[in-house]
Image (tube, helix red, strand yellow):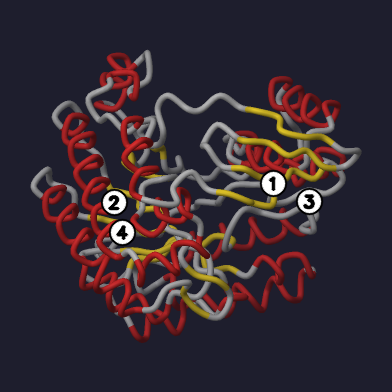
Amino acid sequence: MSFHAVNRTLKWEWAYWIETLYRWNQQGLPLSDEEYQDLVKFKDAEILIGEAYLAAQNEPREKDVHEYFGLDPGIVKVPLDLFLFPRFKRQVLAQEENVILIRDEDGAKKKIFRDRPGMPQFLEYPVENRKDFERISERFDPEDKRRLPANWDSLVNQYEDRDFPLALGGFHCGFFGILNELIGIQNLSYMLHRNSQLIRDILNFFTDFWVTLFSKVLSQIEVDFVHFWEDMAFKTGPLISPDVFREFMLPQYRKIISILKDFGIKMFFVDSDGNLWSMIPLLLEAGVTGIYPLEVAAGMDVVKLRESFAKLQMIGGIDKRSIAKGKREIDKELSRIAKTIGKGGYVPCIDHSVPPDISWDNFCYYRRRLNQLIKSTSIRLT
């Protein structure tokens, strides 16, 4: 990522849908007993629906796959609780045959559909006005020691002798991301114009919250990069305009990155689905150094990105749709990104969690070919 000459880039892969691993196991993927029992538990419980389905995706289940292909140790995030603490008590408000209406632990009201996987339908969010935010802000105390895991002292010792990159941040740590989680995109779009001071106050609050929490952690450990979770774009462009980002988010990014740089951190990544082209100049101006997962279907072409942004750090960018189509398309896709690997600052992998329409045979062919390509491609720029 420093664009120095090295013998090769990293052999990494992103996460996997739990249904993908279940299908692969039936097609020949050897799994440990522990991994297999986890998969059976989810299938037998029939919870691959709604929010339970999504929660399953967030659990790390890649160990057996990564060992099978000899991948390098991947990113480990410092396990901090970055959201509401304590959470709300979950309430079931109504039930029908295929629909459950709940108020979840995050304070959101939503419908969960029993008969189909994917996102639940959000009906209400916990923050609609200043009074709501003042009430919920009490659950964001950076001084609460319970935000650290119970085995924190042991982890501090483990991190001193690690062979993997360590990251701060992640889910819920992002300026658009936290607004979207607490307010929702529709209400946020109105509030940016009708109650802009409240938005500024919320963002100032969370900047201070993250700075305080991260500073405590960084007084005990060193990390390699900070991960901002935004999910601020869809297929054809961002969910907010560059002008909105410049006015509301850019000052916050500059502030937190400036402070974290004092701890010796040099890399700052934004995780966002969708098309971020129009936001990249602003993100770089803010101090962000890298982006992932670079979805090809949304126009995030790593070849063109490298031509436009010589020092943008990139992870992802391999079209999952091509990997599902078979060997010919896999070869074509790897040929497309091959030269970008040699230019540095890029770790190639599938452009998001691996979906179940990619067969085990196709994934094996893809991953072995990519490993060969990585092995044969040195990074020559200095």
Q: CA distance from mark 4 to mark 3?
A: 46 Å
- In the image, residue 232 lies at what x, y percent? 46, 65
Task: Label 2: state its secondary structure.
Answer: helix
The residue that mark 4 highlights is 199
Q: CA distance from mark 2 to mark 4?
A: 5 Å
Which mark is on residue 17?
Answer: 1
Q: Quadrant of residue 113?
A: top right
Residue drawn at 12 percent across, 43 percent down? 263
In this rendered view, identify the residue nearer to me: 209 or 314: 209
Task: Label 1: state its secondary structure.
Answer: loop
Give the mark, 4 or 3, whose residue is nearer the N terminus. 4
Task: Label 3: state its secondary structure.
Answer: helix
Placement of the N terminus among the 4 image quadrants: bottom left
The residue that mark 2 highlights is 202
Answer whether residue 307 is visible to the viewer in this image. yes
Q: Residues within 10 Å of mark 3 (few under 14, many from 20)?
A: many
Give the mark, 1 or 3, whose residue is nearer the N terminus. 1
- Give amino acid for label 2: Ile
In the displayed structure, does residue 317 sit left or right of residue 358? left
Pair 3/2: label in front: 2
Residue drawn at 62 percent across, 53 percent down? 353
Give the mark, 1 or 2, whose residue is nearer the N terminus. 1
- Give amino acid for label 4: Ile
- Position of 90 relative to 180 (above/below): above
Pair 1/4: label in front: 4
Pair 1/2: label in front: 2
Residue drawn at 63 percent across, 51 percent down? 122
- Position of 139 relative to 339 (above/below): above
- Point out the residue furthest to the left here: 262
- Position of 81 relative to 369 (above/below): above
Residue contact between numbered discs 2 and 4, judged by CB atoms under 8 Å: yes
